[in-house]
Image: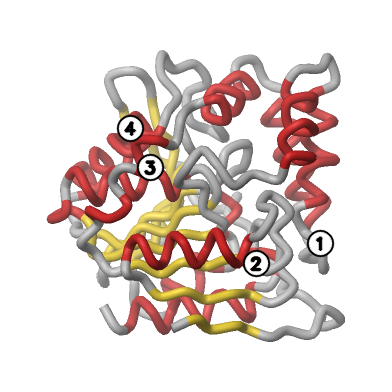
Amino acid sequence: MNTVMQTDATTQPMTSERIETMQTQYFTRPEGTLAYTDYGGSGDLVLMLPGMGALRSEYRFLAPQLREAGYHPITVDLRGHGESSPRWDVYDVPSVGSDILALIEHLDAGPAHVITTSFTPGAAVWAAAERPEAIRSLVLIGAFVRDSKINPLMQVAFWMMMNNPWRVQTWRMFYKSLYPSRKPADFEQYLDELTHNMAQPGRFDAAKGLAASSRQPSKERLSRVQAPVLVVMGTKDPDFPDPVAEAEYIADQTHGKLVLIDGAGHYPQTEMPEQTAPAILDFLAQR
């Protein structure tokens, strides 16, 4: 059953709880080191991975609410991103999926609820199919889990953005377009942090590597996911020619629940957190 969350775009967005005061922790993999923030708590583990070309503070609104609801939330920078080490040999769906499974094992608090956005839902699907006992549930936000269904104009613009001398600043401008209805109060601060990070050696190459990788490994495993799935999609997500149809496809393949955030773009958890967070919390409470 599809649920559409209505919102008033004139509503003032939530203010951010910045994570700078929380200590960054590190987990070493054979190729490099992953950075993460542990919000604490003794409840079910909730592992949150941001999209490609983003920071783990993408979940700055959701993580505190999860902690208050009794969960144990952890946000993780992707390989090559944020405070994770910048240069890795491989950037693709299976490698990020293996990062998810390795971190759950390292934390020794699983099985885990896994919340992902954009690129990382494909990795979460891969992980859930490869090791079902490690995954309690999946939340897939603005999910790219197959190689098709990309807006052609966005595809051309994306290629040009990834291959020009001003690509960091171009990424900054592109990122703004992913919030079609409104932006959070701290949006410019987040953009400054993201731009500074993406300008560091190796960071943009990591994002480019993930962007170029195939989603076929996740598409092949969609129907094999045994964990409960929540698909969250903004109805104005510009990355898809028909975001609702793409979300319906994913929900159908995974036998999951679908929640549409009316008017939201690619990051509904930060564009419209007052609509997205309750939907996620309600889903987790039933698991």
* Tag 2 and tag 4, C-beta contact below 8 Å: no
Q: Taking 227 as reference, is 238 left or right?
A: right
- Foreground residue among 224 and 79: 224
Question: What whole-number distance in Å separates the C-alpha atoms at marks 2 and 4?
Answer: 26 Å
Which amino acid type is shown beneath numbered disc 3?
A: Ala
**Can you give x and y, in whole percent of width and height, for residue 254 in the image?**
33, 62
Which residue was labeled with disc 3?
123
Residue 94 numbered tag: 4
Disc 2 element: strand
- Foreground residue among 68 and 118: 118
Residue 17 shows in this picture: no
Work out whether mark 1 precedes mark 4 in sequence or the reverse, and give the earlier one: 4
Q: Taking 199 as reference, is 27 left or right?
A: left
Residue at image location 84% in from the left, 30% down from the top? 169
Which amino acid type is shown beneath numbered disc 4?
A: Pro
Which amino acid type is shown beneath numbered disc 1?
A: Pro
* Tag 1 and tag 4, C-beta contact below 8 Å: no
Q: Taking 151 as reference, is 192 left or right?
A: right
Question: What whole-number distance in Å separates the C-alpha atoms at marks 1 and 4?
Answer: 31 Å
Q: How crowded is mark 2: few (under 14 residues within 10 Å), some or many (20 or more)?
A: many
